[in-house]
Amino acid sequence: MYDKYAVQINNVNKLFKSYKHPRDRILDVLGFGFLTKNRYEEFWALKDINLNIKKGSKIALVGRNGAGKSTLLKIIAGSLRPTDGDIKINGKVSALMELGTGFHPEFSGRENIFASLSYSGIVGKEAKEKFEEIVDFSELEEFIDKPVKTYSAGMYARLAFATSTVVIPEILIVDEILGAGDAYFINKSIERMKKLTEGGTTVLFVSHDISSVQKMCNEAVWIDKGKVVMEGNILDVTAEYLASIRKQEERRLKARNVRLKHNNFKTLEEGIEDSLVYFHFITENGAPLEKHPISEVKFYCKDKVIECLQIGDAGDTNNGSDLFLIVDKEIINWSSPVEQNGKRYRSFEDVGGEYQHALFVFKVQNLAELRNYELEIVYQDISTEKVKIEFFDGENYVEIGHLEANDDSEWKSSVFNLKEVIHDESMDNETVKTINYQELLEERESNSRIYGSGEMVITSVDFLNDNNEVSHVFQNLGYKKVRINYFAKEKVRNPIFVLAYYLLDGTCAMQVLSNKDGYEVNEAFGEGFVNVFFNPLLLGKGTYLVSVAIFKELNLLDNVEPPAYDLHDKMYEIKVEQPFGVNVSLGLINHPVRWGGNEKGAI
């Protein structure tokens, strides 16, 4: 059974400790850890990893930065030991990890190659033959006698890959190093890895280039916050992973569009850190008198989970995530992770934290976004002590609510509607039924991106997907609708509506004009809207800034900008992605064409 697998991983966990002072690390290493209590932070990089990797497999590890991919590969390579759990390796491992490791920078490429071959037991005539093969594959003939420290990242990647694969390894680990190479060498390396797997080599491949991953591998493992989220067919796993990235991108673009619209918007942590909202647990008396186990924090929007933090799991303090804890026992009252009856959690308890509270952080951009969410806390009710949840609004901590306290030992869930506690109406991004024209004028005056005479104004612009939901990420050849909502304070005849899409360098990629397309609004008065349908959307992959305008007139023969009632200049941002499964670039425009030739019946 064991011979079937190249790698077997059972319940592997990896804990890192971040010490306040170097002396604390030394005391811990010498066995005096009890003296360093509360002087370090714990970070679980991996938690409960279970994988069986068959011989000859081509496995991709995908996930965000900080997810735990590299830590797992280092454990497999033997350069790190797991905190606990078992790992069995059946074969010799050749690992290509960070740039700068494995070669001596002062030695030439030639000297490093022979040193590496000698370490592998290859000397004499065979070493010379392998040397020629390495130089030929890496195409570094002109530089082979120069010190490696003078090599570019791409040259180093070529030399490292060629040297590591000249002797057929049983297990090959490639962690992002090929990302330093050019497209030509990456494709060349992928072809070599394919040949290696045909000979029985097991390949573990990490890259953020999903195109390379799909070319090379037939299976994938998605890791997030130190845990395996999904494993299986490469296309299935990468599709789910990319979907999660799109959700994150949606939130980013939504927040950016709010910022573009409100030049003078109010940040939540102005002067501290833009985009981070601080929440905490606190009692009436400050530090808690009893323990309060907390296992989950979730944020919902329209009944969909936007972010979920499993407290006590690996990565719960990873500040690269959109939701994370701050754990510092000198100032914060979070306990160490606990596992009890299959449940993981940390307790809000008095561990001597100077600030008395237990803190968690959620990344947003403004109050308008935060008002859309509900907050759920999963906790164990083992006390009658009242625990409050508050958030910092830039000036003060504002109470959201408190956890039910009946001391019945039950695990419970409390949900709080954040809209009920955030009363900044100027940041409310919901549709307003009654248009306040004076407020619109004031907003226009404060925003340099908006100009025009103002008799007719744009109140909002919605980008909608095929489910008629607001979205900011679309797929090439998919469906897209833009709704321009307007208000005319007086009767306006024959207004012209325009949408213009710009690349980030200012180049106009596409412009649509209502009069060119034969669409007319004979008379506008009061509230109304105009829909623009893109079915299919032909714009190619990229990020676009969108301008929206209502012109008084527009002569198609004149290239001078006409007078506008209202113009929102590059105020909206959207992203277009290629159809799933298509990795070759389709260019700026995916134009429909008809093919024909000299086949029978061809015109």
Image: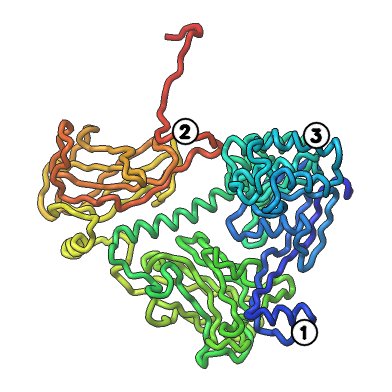
Please name the colour scheme applied to the rendered image. rainbow
Q: Are the residues at dot 3 and dot 1 in contact (C-beta closer than 8 Å)?
A: no
Using the numbered discs, state the Cα–Cα distance from disc 2 to disc 3 in whole angstroms: 42 Å
Return the mark for residue 32. Answer: 1
Using the numbered discs, state the Cα–Cα distance from disc 3 to disc 1 in whole angstroms: 53 Å
Where is 455 relative to 555, above or below?
below
> Which residue, given by chain and number where applicable, does mark 3 sit on?
129
Indicate which label's residue lies in the foreground, 1 or 2: 1
Q: In percent of the image, x 78 and y 67: which residue is there?
A: 84
Q: Nearer the viewer, residue 178 or 222?
A: 178
> Which residue, given by chain and number where applicable, does mark 2 sit on?
586
Using the numbered discs, state the Cα–Cα distance from disc 1 to disc 2 in whole angstroms: 61 Å
Q: Which amino acid is tagged 2?
A: Leu
Say what secondary structure mark 2 lies in. Answer: loop
Indicate which label's residue lies in the foreground, 3 or 1: 3
568 displayed left or right of 555 = right
Q: Nearer the viewer, residue 137 or 460?
A: 137
Q: Nearer the viewer, residue 95 or 545?
A: 95
Quadrant placement of the C terminus: top left
Indicate which label's residue lies in the foreground, 2 or 3: 3
Q: Are the residues at dot 2 and dot 3 in contact (C-beta closer than 8 Å)?
A: no
Dot placed on the residue nearer the N-terminal end, 1 or 2:
1
Q: Is residue 232 visible?
A: no
Q: In percent of the image, x 61 and y 54: which residue is there?
A: 63
